[in-house]
Amino acid sequence: MTRSRHSDALRAAQMYYLQDLTMDAIARELRTSRSTVSRLLSAARETGLVQIQIRNPLDTGPELESMIRREYNVDVHVVPVLESLNEAETLDRVALQAARTIGPLVDSNAILGVAWGSTLSAVSRHLTRKITHDTVVVQLNGAGNMHTTGITYASDIMRRFGSAYGARVEQFPVPAFFDHAATKAAMWQERSVQRILDLQARMSIAIFGVGSVEADYPSHVYAGGYLDENDLRMLAHSDVVGDVATVFFRRDGSSDGIVLNERSTGPALSQLRQVRRRICVVSGASKINGLRGALTAGLATDLILDEATARRLVGFEGVAPANG
Amino acid sequence: MTRSRHSDALRAAQMYYLQDLTMDAIARELRTSRSTVSRLLSAARETGLVQIQIRNPLDTGPELESMIRREYNVDVHVVPVLESLNEAETLDRVALQAARTIGPLVDSNAILGVAWGSTLSAVSRHLTRKITHDTVVVQLNGAGNMHTTGITYASDIMRRFGSAYGARVEQFPVPAFFDHAATKAAMWQERSVQRILDLQARMSIAIFGVGSVEADYPSHVYAGGYLDENDLRMLAHSDVVGDVATVFFRRDGSSDGIVLNERSTGPALSQLRQVRRRICVVSGASKINGLRGALTAGLATDLILDEATARRLVGFEGVAPANG
DNA sequence: ATCCAAACTGCACGTTTGTGCAAAGAGCTT
DNA sequence: AAGCTCTTTGCACAAACGTGCAGTTTGGAT
């Protein structure tokens, strides 16, 4: 009896989280066993019935966070990670916390712009469900390249976002970069494309990682067959430090005159900056240069990143966690 | 070292609630004992660092809630209570859940209007701390009567609200009812009073219970020496069913021509209805008539009440909880 | 009616968590 | 520095909790 299961879960959650009853007491009230209550509560958490939020008081927070906040004017969430973890495990932790931080921000009628990449893929795997209405998830930039149409990879990410929030998913079935700027210009006149662009223009939340040219192991974009040697040479000559949604920028946040952007399918930086809430997720200290550029460009309103990267960002390279 | 304690609590909360680590693992990372982590997490919950919210999807919720919602156009939170509890214990449960439901709604820069009475007193005892800035708590109506100035009783309530949210408290040092309407009119011209009235006019949240003329054991207002025999007779002749913040109304929600209101210090119903968020807390089925009137008058946007009262409200007198 | 797969339940066990208590530490006064 | 109080810590134990497993129910399909 699903009908009653859902309402039992709600009752259980209220009694457990809002009245501090034990599962035992709840079981008696619900005339079932304690283990069932335990499972009801798990279900309640997983389906987003219970929302747990950590709010760090802006001013009393750790030094590290306030420094970043002051310097770049973003809301920072530094993810504490065990020091022993390797890069992949760190990404996983950051993604998990990012997913849970994003959850409470997504609300009915939101238009959620989502980029793709290894960071976003990890985040998408950890999203917790939350029932919303008339929410739309729209892809920020195309994912096709010379080898694949990119559909499966990017669309897995999109699909996971969509099903977590019960949202309609709008894919962007174009390559990441057109070979010719003229083709892009032509496509941008198509009504099917304009529908997507229009959604993007009305986004209320954008979620993206950053690519960094000098990352230890470079992002998909720089390695995955999206750009040819000519392109890479051009990037090198334009002082590009990184990208957001396959749109490139320099260390000082500028992007004017980077010709590759004319063939990129991602939203112009100026357009991205119009979005009310722009959440940037970063894991791995080697992305530092791309990240600096993105922050200088004012691309993010919220930044979620691991502790080591946060320390490098403010120049505390080898400083220990701020306790003791 | 308080400084580091706070930030340890934040780190612990993130690792526990957002990354699902065990307290043991967190203790190792923080180089302390597991019991300390347990205490850090308690502190994090109590200081409002961790916010737990239960959202019941409006449409998929239990029948009871949607019926009330449709009929009276309010957001309902039905508090499940053990069937074995007596009236005092029920009030305590409702108050606890109300306090926790209110918490997440209070934000920086809010102006919080608070009434007084046994319900509000119970709620105030269960508030969890939450750090906010420039929040003001303002008393909705005077509390003095023939026997006392009411200062201690009402001001305890106000003080608890104030300290829970780190807010400035503005008391309203007048009697609940003036003996003469003319005195009220005169006082309302005083700048000291106008300062309070001005705050009330700018409230963003109002919190109140309801008084009901026919309650099993009548509210303070009807018993506590606030009204003399003449007043009570007058009330009986005006078909009054209850009050909110010592302002009376009839079953159909009207309040015109109730002369006592001209001597009352509570906000006019029409003014109360201007407040964006108006939270009504009710415990005890005997308040049903007062509650019906208040809802019909459109005084509340949010209603928190116990299950038994909720069932009576929609006429399901003896119906069992909606499960099985 | 009978069968089957899938979902649900309660038990039992091991794990995780809360808390009284004694010891250690921090902050102040003399 | 010694002495004092008030707070914080870790230990040890009891309480509360999560989960694999086997038995049971449910809702079709035949």
Image (tube, coloured by chain):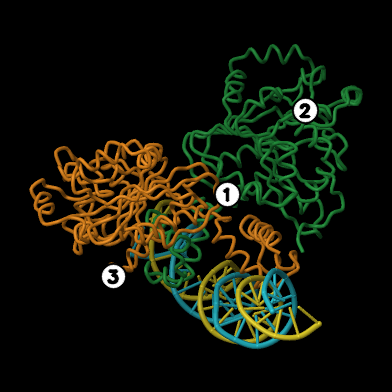
Chain colours: A green, B orange, C cyan, D yellow
> Mark 2 or mark 1: which is in front?
1
Q: Position of residue A305 (x, y in %)?
A: 73, 46
Q: Is residue A82 left or right of residue B65?
A: right
Q: Amino acid at mark 2?
A: Asn
Of the 4 image quadrants, the one containing the C terminus of chain B is bottom left
Q: Is residue B34 left or right of residue B121?
A: right
Q: Which numbered tag is attached to residue B218?
A: none
Q: Specify the subunit that label 2 lies on.
A: A
SS at circle 2? loop
State the residue position of label 3: B86
Q: Which numbered tag is attached to residue A145?
A: 2
Q: Is residue A253 left or right of residue A48?
A: right
Q: Position of residue A184 (x, y in %)?
A: 72, 16
State the residue position of label 1: A128
Q: Amino acid at mark 1?
A: Thr
Q: Amino acid at mark 3?
A: Asn
The reply to the same-chain question for discs 3 and 1 is: no
SS at circle 3? loop
Q: Residue B15 is drawn in which quadrant?
A: bottom right
